[in-house]
Image (tube, helix red, strand yellow):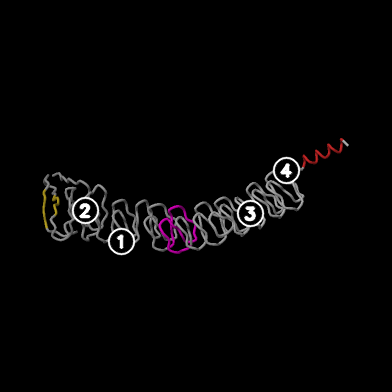
Amino acid sequence: MLEKTNEGKAEASRHQKVRHDGVNETENFRHDGVNETENVRHDGVNETENVRHDGVNETENVRHDGVNETDNVRHDGVNETENVRRDWTENVRHDWVNETENVRHDGVNETENVRHDGVNETENVRHDGVNETENVRHDGVNETENVRHDWVNETENVRHDGVNETENVRHDGVNETDKVRHDGINETENVRHDGVNETENVRHDGVNETDKVRHDGVNETDNVRHDGINETENVHTTGSTRRRTFATTRSTRRRTFATTGQRDGEHGANETAIVENRLHDGANETASLENVRHDRVNETAIIELLSLP
């Protein structure tokens, strides 16, 4: 008799916290005739909070069965509550495919921070071809600032699609970095070009340009040089504009200023840095030639020509 009693106690110990019989059970009750561990339940019958079922191994906070469940319980396309996964509400995951926290997919419209389309997505990465909110990417439809689209992988602050975009928004289908715009040609920080009117400190014409160096035949602002077209302060153009040139001879050591009405390209005389407010015409000029222009004749920063007899 004592032996039977001990066997009964051992059997009870083995089955402690493990229940099964195919009948509905309460919280922390398991059943189905299969070994189960703590917090792991299955049987295909409705269960309560923190109770799982369906005959498949499950871990903590992982549930499935096709039946309505409570908070932190997931299932299969049936309406659920907050933090419950389904298919059309915020913070809801579903589609019969494994999903991680903050990763959603199903091809149905979702709200901010909700992902969908059946493809793995990371935090703040969405796609589905439907209009989405800020920081949501989609499909070639007009979007707002910080919104990306075109069905192509994009990084933060990188946009492209060939549609007009706002400040700090890039487009053309090519990878671009922050504050870098282009038109199919490589450009560096703060260097832009494309043949379209741009603002101060914006460059264009399809040719590499450095900071504060512009050219294109379009009016520009103060300290902006170009090509014989009207210019701003300290920039003088063509014709009878007075200029000072150096006349040098082999027989004398002298420097003479000759002021003439010669036009660009007519005199061919070297000029010094004193040739402030001079002309220029699109020919190469160096940084040290600040406010020094030329008229199709190469010039240096400081030229003091002394010819020996």
Q: Is residue 265 magenta?
A: no
**N-terminal label among 2 and 1:** 1
Residue 103, label in figure = none
Q: Amino acid at mark 4?
A: Lys
Helix, strand or loop at label 4? It is loop
Helix, strand or loop at label 3? It is loop
Q: Residue furthest right?
A: 1
Helix, strand or loop at label 2? It is loop
**N-terminal label among 4 and 2:** 4
**Magenta residue span:** 139-161
Q: Could you give the CA–CA distance between mark 2 and mark 3, rounded to whole angstroms?
A: 79 Å
Q: Could you give the CA–CA distance between mark 1 and mark 3, rounded to whole angstroms?
A: 60 Å
Helix, strand or loop at label 1? It is loop
Q: Nearer the viewer, residue 64 or 184?
A: 64
Mark 3 surroundings: few (<14), some (14-19) or many (≥20) residues within 10 A:
many
Q: Please name the residue that numbered disc 3 is placed on.
A: 69
Do tag 1 and tag 3 residues touch (Cβ < 8 Å)? Answer: no
- In the rendered view, does 159 fall on the left or right side of 220? right
x%, y% of residue 263? 16, 60
**The C terminus sits in image quarter:** top left
**N-terminal label among 1 and 3:** 3
Q: Could you give the CA–CA distance between mark 2 and mark 1, rounded to whole angstroms?
A: 24 Å
Q: Nearer the viewer, residue 50 or 192?
A: 50
Look at discs 4 and 2 and give the one toward the viewer: 4
Do tag 2 and tag 3 residues touch (Cβ < 8 Å)? Answer: no
Mark 4 surroundings: few (<14), some (14-19) or many (≥20) residues within 10 A:
some
Q: Residue at x 69, y 54 (%)?
A: 46
Q: Please name the residue that numbered disc 2 is placed on.
A: 293
Do tag 4 and tag 2 residues touch (Cβ < 8 Å)? Answer: no
